[in-house]
Image (cartoon, rainbow, N blue to C red):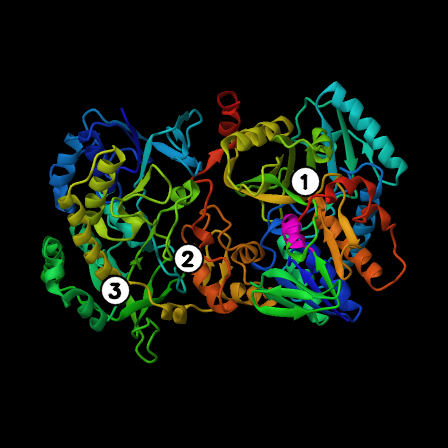
Amino acid sequence: MTEVLIIGAGPAGLAAATAARRSGARVVVLDAAEDVGGQYWRHLPAQRPAAREQVLHHGWSRFTALRRELTGVEIVTGAQVWLAERHDDRPPTVHVLVGPADGRDREQRTFEPDALVLATGAYERTLPFPGWDLPGVFTAGAAQALAKAERVAVGRRVLVAGAGPFLLPVASSLIRTGARVVRVLEAGGWGRLGRAWTARPTELLGASHKAGELAGYVRDLARHRIPYRVATGVIAVHGRDRVEEVTVARLDAQWAPVPGTSQRVAVDAVCVSHGFLPRAELAVAAGCVTGPEGAVAVDGDCRTSVPGVFAAGEITGIGGADLALAEGTLAGTAAAGAAPTQAQRRAVLTHQRFAARLSDGHGIRPGWTGWVADDTLICRCEEVTAGELRDIATATGSRGLRSLKLSTRAGLGVCQGRVCGRSVEELLDRTTGGLLDPGRTAARPLAGLVRLGELARMQGDTE
Amino acid sequence: MRVIVVGAGIVGAAVARELAGAGVAVTVLDRAASAGGTSAAGEGNLLVSDKGPGDELVLAQRSLTLWEAMKDEVKGFPSIEYEAKGGLVVATTEAGAAGLRSFASRQRGAGVIAEEVDPHELEPELTRDYTAAVHYPQDAQVQPAIATEALLAEARRRGAVVRQGVEVLSSLLSGDRLAGVRTTAGDLHADHVVVAAGPWSGEVAARLGVALPVRPRRGTILVTTRMPQRIRHKVYDADYVGAVGSSDAALQTSSVVESTASGTVLIGSSRERRGFDGRIEARVLSALAAKAMVLFPFLADVAVMRAYGGFRPYVPDHLPVIGADPRLPGLWHATGHEGAGIVLSAATAELLADLLLGRETKVAASPFSVERPTLASHLLSSV
């Protein structure tokens, strides 16, 4: 029987697991969280369930259906994959520690699967701005997680800003957990949004419930008289010990702040998200080829460049839960050695067109560096400012990210560039006239923290 | 006089700085970015403690003197984090203790300060299960990537040109003399070409028409999360010296543990010859962790956040190759420093410049010549 290992139990991973199981494979699913569902279907823990969990979730019935289908699948939660050991001609050896991250006796497991499906999702991307390190500034994802998993709102007067349709469900969740949302700001302008969402409407058939979903969120905003502004963003946050005010400004088509349009708004919390980045370090470690935006390159059946390794969901390009489900089904089927159906392949294509529109309408534009001041922190772990990045790049003259990371320390802290990496690259790319080794901040051979004692204990197993 | 230096790592940077200071028109080429290869993948060791009496030790001793003078040379630049922290070599077996004592005694005869000590006065958290410990106060450390950039910046200040992203493709000949290099950015003419491409030097030399036995020897380092400083010296186990001098291709690990200026702890070091294979492997990480915990048991609960690997330029007889290549007039080498390139770059640059400019050398040049007998059999392979 083919052994399929799936990393990630969000929409893509769960769809892959059920598809692989249906195709007759032995299936193991790993996820670092305490329960399946991923970020998308993050929910209250089983010990204190909600009566109507579906209120904060779209496609909840899809989730419960998938969960029911997992019979016969081995689910390992609390599983931290820390190393994928590349073999090039076959799937990597996957090293896992199972148990609470702060526990001292995590169980060590090692997998040598026949096929591997990477469904590791995405990191949220928040662009830096003056004051973004003040208490009271949240990523939209963190605010959403608090709402979904704890039923807690991050503040009383909250402003939501950034880019992409994800801002809308976040605003809805905030409303439902009792916050007053004072404004929702989208950096993309009507021109780009309009072109992205209204061109070639027939392409959106099949993804049309998406439009309904978005319309529902917009109705929510209208009912609560919450202004939704486009071509506008938060360019600074002010406060002594925590957020007291934000400066908002109009943004031009490249997201550069338009002079003379800034305005202060009193709030006690800000939720900001500018998009998502593929969480691809395991794919990179496994040897998979990635594209310019860091997405894992796959063929029409979700095969990566490494034999036996498949990728599904956000790591193949940011496209939302529907695309993740469709890709997961395809990847799980193919990983089990079965042939995907034409309908399964068509479903992926439909949702990919939808994903392309997301990127066209809401993708980050280079003008954001216009709201960054010299003293704005870029790397928060190592406290490196934009001015320091520029000055050191100028002094050394290096066009190498590796060298510049070491001389500036940006991205070398405990988050290993997961928060700041891409922003550091974009700022340095401009200062140096073009980095010769771009994309390096996506490479993290160790995918998680491991204690030395845990590493040492492997000795008996490996030699 | 025009000189092309191939390689913008620490050796190329030091050579460029030295030659430019003597009025030579220097162009540094690197097919990638500056300080992006071996020089960015090590601990930044400036060690005498791991070197027995001999030519490499002489070069290292001269280098330490030069580093002391260079450490504050470049103004308005990030610190190169020069720290004369001293090394502590620890044996944990009786055989290891005997070997360490005899090694230290021979080193003292060659002018190295090596004092047997109670290690807990220097490192309170060191294991209680040690059999001997020798303190080497001359050992020092720099941040190697920043040090490389600082040397390059000083070279530029002295008139050198640094061109990144320019790859050498082949030689330009004038009669039987090397007259420049053909590159991805066109033909570049020069009176001399210096190969300082670290583990890639063999490949560059081959493109220029000569065989040079420089091969990659893989190393891996673990980096912990930041913590309050609990390790004060460069601490390593006595096996390290044996591993450095070994020619075995199989994996060898020995512990090198030290704190950095930023509060992380670096744990090395592995040595393995297997080509340019950059994979990070659990068995190597595990072996490194186990050895480090022998020296510092408290490390068991410390989290590792990063692992990275690099390639040392390995030469079969464990000595760098420095000087002119008589097989192709105009061609020079400054390479093959294995794990000691950061420290040796200083005296290597001085020696190469003295030879190239016809000056008297401060150290004997012949031990590092490509013509030395111990390399002869390795030069026969055809290109």
Residue visible at 39% across and 45% down? A288
- Which residue is denoted by mark 2 in the rendering? A422
Quick one: SS at disc 2? helix
Residue nearest the viewer, comparing B31 with B222: B31
**Residue type beneath disc 1:** Arg
Q: Who is closer to the viewer here, B217 or B86? A: B217
The location of residue A70, given as percent across then percent down, is: 19, 29
Cα–Cα gap, marks 3 and 1: 53 Å
Q: Look at the numbered disc 1 and give the secondary structure of its residue.
A: loop
Main SS of the magenta segment? helix
Asked whether B51 falls inside the magenta stretch, the response is no
Q: Which residues are magenta?
A: B196-206
**How far separated are the C-alphas under marks 3 and 2?**
19 Å
Residue carrying label 3: A360
- Check contact, mark 1 vs mark 2: CB within 8 A: no
Q: Which residue is mark 1?
A: B232
